[in-house]
Amino acid sequence: MDITELILDDHHEQRRLFAILEQIDRGETDILAAIWDRLATFLELHAKAEEEIFYPALLQVGIAARRTGRVEDETLDAIHDHNEIRDAIAEAARHQVGTDDWFAAVAAANLANSDHMAEEEREGLTDFRRLAGLPRRHQLAVAFAAYEARNYAGVEPVDPDPAGYVRAVEDAVAEEPSGSGSLSVGSLKPN
């Protein structure tokens, strides 16, 4: 098991659910609402799991490999993307399901999410596979799967400040005992 594969699996499911929404008649608002509620919950849970588990680990291995600038930029961008997705989900909640405005908000969420996934797959996941060994990726996969399982009903959406998030992770990494090499899963408490 590898955290990068679990993230890719989640991405596939997100794409599948957006595709399902696009194929449902506008008049079937109960079905649209049910699928959207599942997808919106899943998007937030996935983002939060990445923020709690994946991105702190990416920053940690990037700092250790002296690629701080690159992984900082990737993480800042990812947290910003997560916030854009959250904002689009919140916008959809302001409109009646099945209306033009609701579909526009769902489309905005899809676009923001698609852009985020493509960039993450090209950069963050690739860098992490190069910088972290399989035992570490497995350890994080177990934590990621457990996080999603424990929170399957959803988590509270919170827009973290991207710079504050990166600063908190870097502070946690700096406080580690020298040579320990592992930020404990869930130890990050973003501002």
Image (spheres, helix red, strand yellow):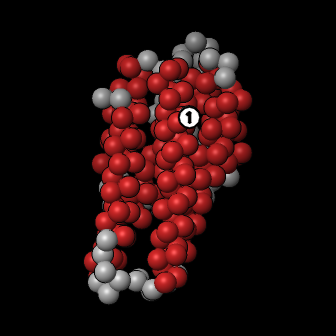
From the top left corner, tell me how far across and down residue 35 is, in percent: 31, 69
Q: Is residue 80 left or right of residue 45?
A: right
Identify which residue, 162 or 127, lies in the foreground.
127
Q: Is residue 47 visible?
A: yes
Figure label count:
1
From the top left corner, tell me how far across and down residue 71 is, in percent: 63, 32
Q: Quadrant of the N terminus?
A: top left
* Residue at the image point whose x is 30% and y is 75% from the top: 24
From the top left corner, tell me how far across and down residue 48 is, in percent: 48, 50
> Dot 1: within a 10 Å radius of its alpha carbon, few (fewer than 14), some, or many (20 or more) residues?
some
Q: Is residue 77 left or right of residue 45?
A: right
From the top left corner, tell me how far across and down residue 69 is, in percent: 71, 29
What amino acid is found at the position of numbered circle 1 in the picture? Answer: Glu
Q: Which residue ends up furthest to the top in the rendered image?
A: 179
Q: Does residue 125 lie above or below 9 as drawn? A: above
Q: Does residue 129 lie above or below 142 as drawn? A: above
Q: Is residue 29 visible?
A: no
Identify which residue, 115 or 39, lies in the foreground.
115
**Tag 1 residue:** 123
* Residue at the image point whose x is 38% and y is 41% from the top: 8
Q: Does residue 43 lie above or below 97 as drawn? A: above
Q: Does residue 152 lie above or below 1 as drawn? A: below
* Residue at the image point whose x is 35% and y is 83% from the top: 26
Q: Helix or strand or loop: what does disc 1 sit on?
A: loop
* Residue at the image point whose x is 52% and y is 20% from the top: 131
Q: Is residue 69 left or right of residue 32?
A: right
